[in-house]
Image (cartoon, rainbow, N blue to C red):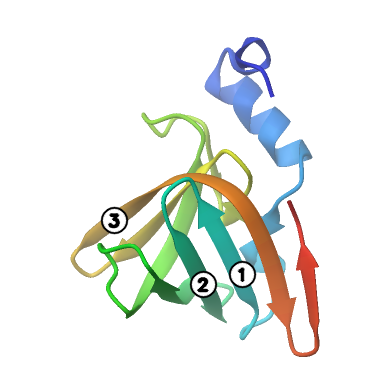
Amino acid sequence: MTNSRLRSPRAAIAVLAAGHGILLTSQRPGTRVYVETTDYCYELTLLDQRSLKVEIVSNDPCIGVRATGFFERSVYDEEGQAALVAWIAAGMRMQIRFANGVLNSRPVVTATICGDGWHYKVF
C-alpha cells in the first residue's frame, strides 16, 4: 500500500476495507485472534460480537497479564480519521477501550484467527 493511494481518509478506508482483514462482528463468541504488532503480541478472545467485548492476554505492559475491554476500531493514521470499526488489518492500529482508558496499539503485522479445531493465518 503506497501513500499515494491513501491521500485522504476516505481513500484509505476504501483500500483497507478491500484488503485482507478480520471483521470481529462476523465471528462467533469464543473465537480467538492472535495479533502481532511492531512492538507486542495480543491474544484476543471474542466474548460478544455485538458489543465487541474481548478478553486480552498480551506482553504489552499497558495491559498486564489479562484484561477485558471493548474493541472499538482500527485506524490507519495517528489522527484516527481513517478508521474501520471492528476490523483488524495489517498496518492498522487497534483501539481497545478499557475502564481506565483506550489502548492504541502499534501497527499490526500479522494476524491468525482460531476456533475449536481450526486456525487460519489471515496475513
Q: Which residue is pictured at 18% across the width and 65% down the height?
A: 100
Residue at the spot of label 1: 33
Report the side of 26 relative to 74 (left or right): right
Q: Where in the figure is residue 85, as x and y percent of width and height?
A: 54, 51
Pointer 2 or 1: first along the chain: 1
Task: Please tell me whether mark 2 or mark 3 is closer to you in this view.
Answer: 2
Amino acid type of the residue tagged 2 in the rendering: Glu
Residue 7 vs 49, above or below: the answer is: above
Q: Marks 2/3: CA distance?
A: 17 Å
> Is the C-beta separation of discs 2 and 1 under 8 Å?
yes
Residue 43: mark in rendering? 2
Residue indicated by mark 3: 102
Answer few, some or many: residues within 10 Å of disc 1's Cα (few below 14, many 20 plus, some between 14 and 19). many
Can residue 52 be seen in the rendering of this structure? no
Q: Secondary structure at mark 3?
A: strand
Q: Position of residue 19 (x, y in %)?
A: 76, 40
Name which quarter of the figure residue 103 lies in: bottom left
